[in-house]
Image (cartoon, rainbow, N blue to C red):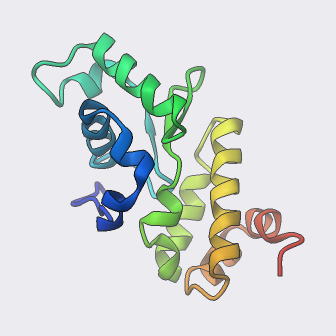
């Protein structure tokens, strides 16, 4: 089912790094965040020509340039071989881990990701989330749906 809305935390305006981004890169971030095909892991197909259709004045080259700026600042991770893009902190910032069933859906979509580097980046973010709050209601759903992933991200953490 396609997403109907995107969640933007108001604390983004307290983030010095985000505020330092050029306005067009901030705009690109919000365009990516609000894509209907963005999955529960924060991954979408990286098709610059499709993204360029979101803004009348953007070309494919504009998208490539703007996304490269976000990539250099670690807001996105891109695997150009698999044509996948990750909004790096999506799994920590979109309240996915507060709901057992949503976490199950995230675990299922994690299994559909082709890119090893994107899965590794998600693992890092999930590990950070577990360190931040291991009592979230979504952890049992993730453990139930993907016990290997859960073990990998929690191994050695208490």
Residue at 69% x, 55% y is 123
The residue sitting at 44% across, 46% down in the picture is 17
Can residue 74 be seen at all in this image of the molecule?
yes
Does residue 51 appear to the left or right of 77 in the view shown? left
Of residues 84 and 61, the one drawn nearer to the viewer in this rendering: 61
- On-image quarter of the C terminus: bottom right
- Front-most of residues 70 and 126: 70
Residue 134 location, x and y as percent? 67, 83
User: Which residue is depicted at the point 24% across and 35% down?
Assistant: 23
Judge whether 27 appears above or below 105 on screen: above
> Looking at this rendering, what residue extends furthest in the left direction?
56
Looking at the image, is 10 positioned above or below residue 119?
below
134 lies left or right of 106: right
Q: Which quadrant of the view contains residue 69?
A: top left
The x and y percentages for residue 89 are: 51, 55
Which residue: 52% across, 61% down? Answer: 91
Q: Quadrant of the N terminus?
A: bottom left
Foreground residue among 114 and 13: 13
User: Residue at the right extreme?
Assistant: 156
Q: Is 77 left, or right, of 8 in this rendering? A: right
Residue 46 visible (yes or no): no
Residue 103 location in percent, x, y?
Answer: 54, 72
Query: In the picture shown, does residue 155 fall above or below 42?
Result: below
Q: Position of residue 118 (x, y in %)?
A: 63, 41
């Amino acid at each position: 089912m396609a997403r109907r809305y995107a969640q933007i935390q108001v604390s983004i305006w307290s983030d010095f790094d985000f505020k330092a981004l050029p306005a067009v890169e901030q705009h690109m971030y919000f365009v990516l965040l609000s894509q209907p095909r963005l999955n529960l892991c924060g991954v979408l197909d990286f098709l610059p020509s499709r993204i360029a259709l979101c803004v009348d004045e953007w070309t494919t080259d504009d998208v490539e340039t703007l996304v490269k700026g976000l990539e250099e600042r670690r807001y996105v991770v891109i695997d150009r071989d698999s044509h996948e893009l990750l909004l790096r902190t999506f799994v920590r910032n979109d309240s996915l881990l507060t709901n057992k069933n949503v976490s199950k859906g995230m675990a299922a979509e994690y299994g559909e990701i082709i890119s090893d580097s994107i899965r590794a980046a998600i693992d890092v973010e999930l590990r950070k989330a577990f360190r931040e709050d291991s009592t979230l209601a979504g952890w049992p759903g993730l453990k139930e749906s993907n016990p290997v992933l859960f073990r990998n991200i929690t191994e050695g953490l208490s």
